[in-house]
Image (cartoon, rainbow, N blue to C red):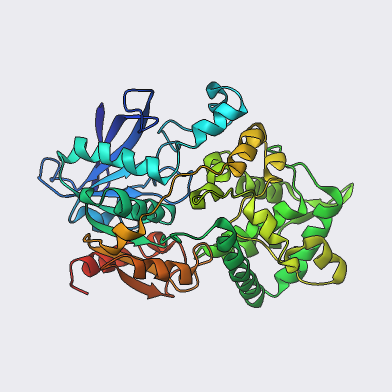
Amino acid sequence: MSAARYRQAGVVLTDRRFSVPLDHSAPDGEKIELYAREAVAPGREDADLPWLLYLQGGPGFGANRFSGTQAWLGRALKDYRVLLLDQRGTGASAPVNRQTLPLRGDAPQQAAYLGFFRADSIVRDCELVRREVTGGAPWTVLGQSFGGFCTVNYLSTAPEGLAAALITGGLPTLDGHADDVYRAAYPRVERKVRAHYARYPMDVERAREIGAYVLEHEPVLPNGYRLTLEAFQSLGIWLGAGDGSDRLHYLLEDAFVRSPGGRELSDAFQEQIGAALSYASHPLYAVLHEAIYAQGGRATDWSAERVRGEFPQFDGAKALANGGALLFTGESVHPWQFDADPALRPLREAAELVAGRVDWAPLYDSVRLAANEVPVAAAVYHDDMYVDTGMALRTADAIRGARSWVTNEFEHDGVRAGGSRVLDRLLGMVRGEV
């Protein structure tokens, strides 16, 4: 383990690196390197403080690169020494992408490798890291979104490592298939789109105009992304964030310019939409997104794409032909993205094999959760577009002693937008103060 210490406003940071087995069932086999950033309040560098581990959402995103004490970090530093872990495959922790994955061999070998990057492996990483940094003492875990899924796996498999579990927008279904997740999701997404159009009624026609242009021309964006109608519709993923509706509106309002060749999509629009749609910074998200739900001997088999067929209102071409509002889609991954996105094209064959895999290990232990003794507090967002509220509350009920705070004050990114208030509330809940 190497360490480099430096400072930002209000925080002292240390880079940490750890070696863990790729396959935890073969601890003497191949090792991978994990990266984490330790954060502590100035003047408390050598204090004996309890640890808080932060697990980021995703899958596929490294831990936040905060500037100073942004969001919830300042509140956490009042009580804890914080570890911001890049989960395996993300950030600086053995990153998985089109450049690195070919090192594993052919597509079947790549797909087998990808199987080691789910929540179960992440939690076993955390246990090795915990023993190294805390000397064996349990720590508190703050899990956002997919990080919450990992936290429930932690409660199922290694609760002895946890002093408390804090979950924000991240209570998974314990036994539901990906099909169940998306059947619940499409109606939520439609509500979010209708709410967006109610807020910005001018966007109904703007979206139709852009959609019609894209359907006719299928332009190739500056980053090489092939913009299809389905890809344009997928911008609806923004609508699950607190400022997402506003961001979408501002993008749509300046889409076209007049040129000598006629009306066309502006360079600025193409640059913005290309950045929004590309998975170059988080390809593991696309490859493993449905696999985070996989267990019970069933393949995910491109669940979101199959289930979308049950909701014909999302057929963009038909909406344009019939004069209807174009519905954006939400948080879902589809096979066509592996053709459209240059960052994903080399991963298409491996992704197909992952989608067809059936021998996934169980992620959650309902018996152990029912006997849970770890204090658990969860923020459940009332109309979360990404995580179904009903499923989340059923899971909360299945975890002995878990306390839920159901709120409509925030969207799914409440731990960012609400920052210290969200963390303060959850800490009060696990300490019995709220």
**Can residue 96 be seen at all in this image of the molecule?**
no
Relative to 434, 17 lies left or right: right
Relative to 327, 428 lies left or right: left
- Foreground pick, 96 / 236: 96
| Residue 237, percent from left and from top | 59, 58
Identity of the residue furthest to the bottom in this view: 198
**Can residue 123 be seen at all in this image of the molecule?**
yes
Residue 279: quadrant of the picture: top right
User: From the image, which quarter does the C terminus lie in?
Assistant: bottom left
Q: Vertically, is 271 above or below 108?
A: below
Residue 149: quadrant of the picture: bottom left
Q: Vertically, is 72 above or below 100?
A: below
Q: Residue at x 82, y 51 (%)?
A: 264
Relative to 321, 400 lies left or right: left
| Residue 76, percent from left and from top | 24, 55
| Residue 379, percent from left and from top | 36, 67
Residue 275: quadrant of the picture: top right
Q: Residue at x 57, y 64 (%)?
A: 239
| Residue 118, percent from left and from top | 44, 43
- Foreground pick, 20 / 411: 20
- Foreground pick, 267 / 248: 248
Q: Residue at x 74, y 43 (%)?
A: 226
User: From the image, which quarter does the N terminus lie in?
Assistant: top left
Q: Vertically, is 427 above or below 263?
A: below
Q: Vertically, is 151 above or below 181?
A: above
